Image (cartoon, rainbow, N blue to C red):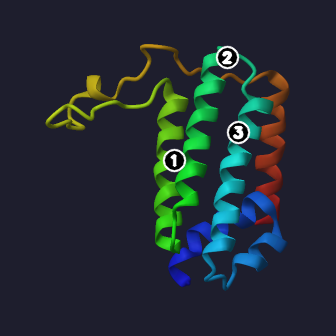
């Protein structure tokens, strides 16, 4: 399954070399479902341990999206359906992280030309901040990557 290289790379980056070896030549839907669920669970765990300032509804809504995605995975009968279910769920999670999920089901057409169609800060806004320690850690990380290259 060479077409699954992106997923294999994600699995390795998240769960290590042993996981990559398990998915390297996997064609079993069971194996891909297992890792798709682990990816979604890792997002929940990451949000709970990383997002320090958020209303409790934000975390609850994220958990709902993750659980909905895992429920969709239960109905996947082939790897394409697993990947499609995961991709759809990750898309919802991504927009949720910007402030809210899009809800254009009843609109005839939505274009990218109008930024107001894509401004999702009505409920909450996203802010990324860095402490001095975080900036210094990032700089050391960048330097070590340059040295390794």
Relative placement, left or right, of 84 versus 32 is left
| Residue assigned mark 2 | 56
Q: Measuring from the top left, give residue 28's x and y in whole percent.
A: 63, 80
C-beta proximity under 8 Å, tags 2 and 3: no
Q: Quadrant of residue 47?
A: top right
How far is mark 2 from mark 1, CA to CA? Answer: 20 Å
Q: Which residue is drawn at the image coordinates 52% and 61% (left, top)? A: 75
| Mark 2 element type | helix
**Disc count in the image?**
3
How far is mark 2 from mark 3, CA to CA? Answer: 13 Å
Q: Measuring from the top left, give residue 92's x and y in whole percent.
A: 48, 40
| Residue assigned mark 1 | 89
Q: Earlier in the sequence, mark 3 or mark 1?
A: 3
* Number of residues whose C-alpha sits closer than 10 Å to that of mark 1, classed few (under 14), some (14–19) or many (20 or more): many
- Checking the image for residue 44, the label placed there is 3
Q: Measuring from the top left, give residue 143's x and y in whole percent.
A: 80, 50
């Amino acid at each position: 399954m060479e077409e699954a290289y992106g997923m294999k790379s994600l699995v390795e980056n998240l769960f290590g070399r042993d996981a990559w070896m398990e998915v390297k030549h996997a064609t079993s839907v069971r194996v891909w479902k297992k890792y798709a669920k682990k990816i979604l669970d890792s997002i929940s765990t990451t949000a709970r341990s990383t997002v320090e300032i958020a209303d409790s509804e934000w975390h609850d809504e994220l958990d709902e999206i993750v659980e909905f995605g895992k429920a969709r995975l239960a109905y996947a009968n082939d790897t394409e359906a697993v990947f499609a279910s995961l991709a759809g769920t990750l898309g919802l999670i991504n927009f949720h992280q910007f402030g809210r999920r899009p809800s254009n089901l009843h609109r005839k057409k939505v274009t990218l030309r109008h930024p107001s169609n894509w401004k999702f800060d009505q409920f909450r806004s996203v802010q990324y901040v860095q402490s001095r320690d975080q900036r210094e850690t990032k700089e050391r990380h960048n330097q070590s990557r340059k040295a390794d290259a």
